[in-house]
Amino acid sequence: MVPMVAIAPFRALRYNLDAVGDLSQVVAPPYDVISPARQEQLYDISPHNVVRLIYGKQSPHDSDADNRYTRAKQVFDAWQRERVLVQDAQPAIYVYEHAFAFQGESFRRLGIVALLELHDSTREQVLRHEATFSAPKADRTQLLQAVRANLSPVFCIAPDAGGRGLALTDRLSRELEPVGACALDQERARVWAVTDPQAIRELQALLAPTKVLIADGHHRFEVAWTNRRMSSAVMVYFSWLGDPAVRVRPIHRVMVVPAEAKPALAARLQASVERQPCANAEELFARLAQSAEPGCFGFYGEGGFALMRLREAVRAEWHRQQAVPAALADLDVVLLHRALVPKLVEETAEHDRLFRYTPDPSDAVATVQRGEGTCAWFVRPIPLAQVYELASNGLTLPQKTTYFYPKLLSGLFIHPFNGTVR
């Protein structure tokens, strides 16, 4: 069989607006960016907010028989019986428009939501660029096995020769009437159901010969693959590689240095990096963006903002000793974690525990200012084309390297495995 990306229409479960009113009240961000405070807020907004399915509350009294996963199943079944969630009558591929602002500009990202068939060659056609970890996979596995549905789509990027995919999705969004619209956190979304067989065949033909890149949802894809006997397809959102509205943000690091290591940190920093003070964050990020050389980082901590350049001797030593592929060796996150951090603190096996992660520079600075972190390190974004090329060559980036912005909203589509509950 020739390897191919095989997609199919499906009958999505979607919110019944007659039951919930405003769709904006029941959608949510993805589970992995919902803080405890945001979880409470989403619970309060609506008794039907999808957070109750994707990231339910825990209780100190949880047991094997009563926990966030069993409660998600109970809610999911009840919402179907009560027609809060209603399954579409016809199979469709859904066009999904996500409108947002980024660095002062307005963007409109277009993609499609369909089922990706999990056949023998799927793993060859789906490129993964970040490592997965056991705890998130165990969490999503328990949820999947409880509700027997894909509650949120995996986010993939597909090559788009000649811009045909983007042009087709744009045309469909203008020709059809939307079947849903909502807003959340200054972002707006609209959805169209594509049921025309010819349009569906065109979309299938565009994706069939490609290799697609997982942008967000590595753990959910791995869980779907492992549990493909439960469902031979997984719900996926496909956006287009050439779309300027596909934005990739870097994920910055807040370093939390143990108290006993703090006295030596300043001296070790001086020995490992060249420091160029900056008056403020604006100056720092402007200078960081202008620098093309490897081993250049932004910094905030004792002494304020600074541009930090890895000393040539440190970088040369790393290149002599490193065992990672050359294409990864000079990436900011690799140099930071593997070349610089071992010079700053001991116990190299524990380095990953030294960091908290955020795509928001102001959040990183505030964390340090509150005393919850020792210093913040800012890295430059990796261009999407480079991420795709690295993944195409089988190379995996370090954890928390890319943040595809904005993340998909949860609650617009659900793929049930066994139909609706009667």
Image (cartoon, helix red, strand yellow):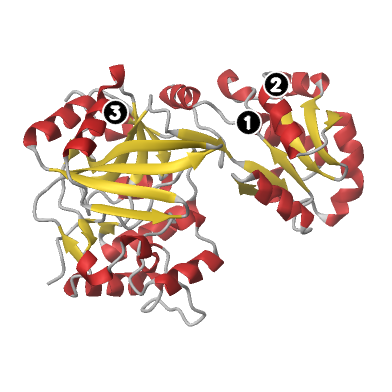
In the image, is 109 to the left or to the right of 328? Answer: left
Label at residue 380 = 1
The C terminus sits in image quarter:
bottom left
Labels 2 and 3 touching (C-beta < 8 A): no
Is 130 placed left or right of 87 in the picture?
right
Q: Give how far apart the Cα atoms at labels 2 and 1 are.
A: 10 Å
Mark 2, residue position:
291
Q: Please give left or right for residue 33 compared with residue 272 in the image.
A: left
x, y (%) of residue 353? 67, 50
CB atoms of marks 3 and 1 within 8 Å: no
Name the residue nearer the viewer: 310 or 65: 310
Q: Quadrant of the N terminus?
A: top left
- In this rendered view, identify the residue nearer to me: 108 or 363: 108
Is residue 362 in sight in this rendering?
A: yes
Q: Are marks 2 and 1 in contact (CB under 8 Å)?
A: yes
Would residue 119 be seen by someone viewing this image from the given angle?
A: no
Residue in view at x 21 percent, y 58 percent: 13
Residue at x-position 89% and y-position 30%: 271
**For the residues carrying marks 3 and 1, which lies nearer the camera in this image?**
3
In the rendering, at what x and y percent does residue 129 appear? 46, 33
Q: Is residue 381 above or below residue 386?
A: below
* N-terminal label among 2 and 3: 3
Question: In terms of secondary structure, where does tag 1 sit?
Answer: loop
Give the image quarter of residue 292: top right
- Residue neighbourhood size for the residue with mark 1, other residues' Cα within 10 Å, grouped as few (<14), some (14–19), many (≥20): many
Residue at the spot of label 3? 166
Q: Residue at x 72, y 18 (%)?
A: 320
**Which residue: 23% across, 65% down?**
17
The residue under label 1 is which amino acid type? Arg
